[in-house]
Amino acid sequence: MRNDDSSPPPESGSSVSPDRPWFTRRSTLVVGVAALAPAALAGWVLTQAFAGSGSDGPRPAPLPASHSALSPGQRDAKPGSTPSASASTSPSASTSPSASTSTPAAAPAPAKGPLSGRTVVVDPGHNTGNFQHTDEIDQQVDIGTARKECDTTGTTTNAGYKEADFTLDVSRRLRTALEAQGAKVVLTHQADRPWGPCITERARIGNEAKADAVVSVHADGVSAGNRGFHVILPAKVKGGSADTAKIVGPSRELGERIAGNFARTTGSAPANYLGSGTGLVVRDDLGGLNLSTQPKVFIECGNMRDAKDAAQLTSPEWRQKAAQGIADGIVGFLGG
Ligand code: ZN
C-alpha cells in the first residue's frame, strides 16, 4: 500500500541508478543473466514494446528506450547453467530421524549444502492480525532518520486475499528452499503473535542473528494496470541508530541477484510503474532497511490490486516459483 512500509515513494525515478540497471552490470551477474529464460526476456521486450497499446488498460508513460531494449550484453547472453539452488541434488541425510539417538524435541540438523553455516532472516511483511490492532501498530517508532508507524496492515487483492497471508506463505516456502541448501533460516514472525512485529524489531531480528542476508517479502497495492515486481534497496542514510553505509553495496548485489532469478523463475517482468524498468528501487524511508546492519532488501512480488498480477499472487504454484527465485538469488549472492 502507498502508506505502508513497503510502498513506493512518490518520486521513484531519482532514487534509481537508471544508467546502471542490474541486468547490464558487472560480470558477476553473468550467471544470473545467462539463467534468464529467453522467453522471459522476450516477454519483457514485448511487454515494454507494447506498453500503452491499450490492451492492458491504462499504463504509465512508455519507458525510456535505454531501458526497454536489451543491451548488447543481454542479447549476447546465452542460457547457461541452472543456478545451484535448483540444480543441487545433495540429499538431506541429516534430516532422517535417528530412532536411537534423537530425542523427540530435537530439531533436525541442517542439511548440507552451499548455504551450510549461513544464516538467512526472512521477514514476512505485515501480520493478518494488524487489521484488528490498529492502535498498537499505529504507535510511532524511531527509525533513526525519522519516526514512523510501528507496522501497517498491508494491502489485499480486490477479492480480499491479504498481503500478510501472501507474505507468510511465500516466506515459509522460501525457508524450506533455503534450508534444503543448508541455511539456518529465521522468520521474524509466523503470525504467531496478535500483531506486528514493529519494523524496528523486524530489523533487530536480522541484526541480532548476524544474518548473511535478509529479505522482507511484500506485495504492492497500487492501481490496476501497474504490474510486475520490484526489489527495494537501502539508500545510504545516517541518523540516530540508522547507518546503512556498510550495507548499501552488498544489499544492491543481493537485490540484483534476487531480481534476476525472480524474473527467471516466475516469468514476471520488472515493475512497469517505477524503477525505470530495472526492477530495482532505492529508498531511504523504510525503517526495516535503515536500521539494518546486515545486507537486506525488500521484494514487492507484484501488485495485488491488478487482476492479472493478483491471479499470479493467489496461485500456490506461482508462489512456489516466487520463493524459488528469491532463494536462488540468495544462493547466488552467498556464493553457493
Ligand atoms: Zn507490504
Image (cartoon, helix red, strand yellow):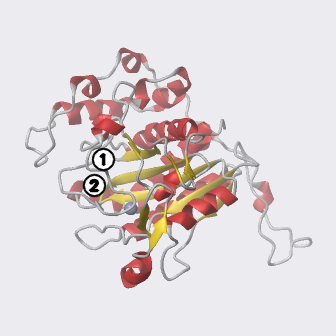
Give residue 59's position: percent from left, percent from top.
14, 44
Q: Is residue 330 positioned above or below 93 on the image?
A: above
| Quadrant position of residue 159 | bottom left
Q: Is residue 308 positioned above or below 194 on the image?
A: above
Q: Which mark is residue 309?
A: 2
Residue in the foreground of this view, choosing between 207 and 76: 207
**Left or right of 278 in this view: 240:** right
Instruction: Locate the C terminus and report the quarter of the image it occupies.
Output: top right
Q: Of all residues shown, which one is farthest toward the right?
A: 100
Question: Could you tell me which residue is drawn at 23 percent across and 55 percent down?
Answer: 308
Q: Is residue 128 positioned above or below 282 on the image?
A: below
Labels 1 and 2 touching (C-beta < 8 A): yes
SS category of the residue bearing label 1: loop
Question: Could you tell me which residue is drawn at 34 percent across and 31 percent down?
Answer: 41
Q: Which mark is residue 228?
A: 1
Q: Of all residues shown, which one is farthest toward the left?
A: 54
Give residue 33's position: percent from left, percent from top.
46, 28
> Earlier along the polypeptide chain: callout 1 or callout 2?
1
Q: Amino acid at mark 1?
A: Gly
Q: Give me the C-alpha separation between circle 1 and circle 2.
A: 7 Å
Give residue 332's position: percent from left, percent from top.
59, 37
Give residue 215's position: percent from left, percent from top.
53, 53
**Left or right of 282 in this view: 51:** left
Residue in the foreground of this view, choosing between 277 and 149: 149
**Left or right of 139 in this view: 229:** left
| Quadrant position of residue 174 | bottom right
Question: Could you tell me which residue is drawn at 61 percent across and 62 percent down?
Answer: 204
SS category of the residue bearing label 2: helix
Q: Is mark 1 within 8 Å of ligand 1?
A: no
View quadrant of ligand 1:
bottom left
Q: Amino acid at mark 2?
A: Asp
Residue in the foreground of this view, choosing between 260 and 65: 65
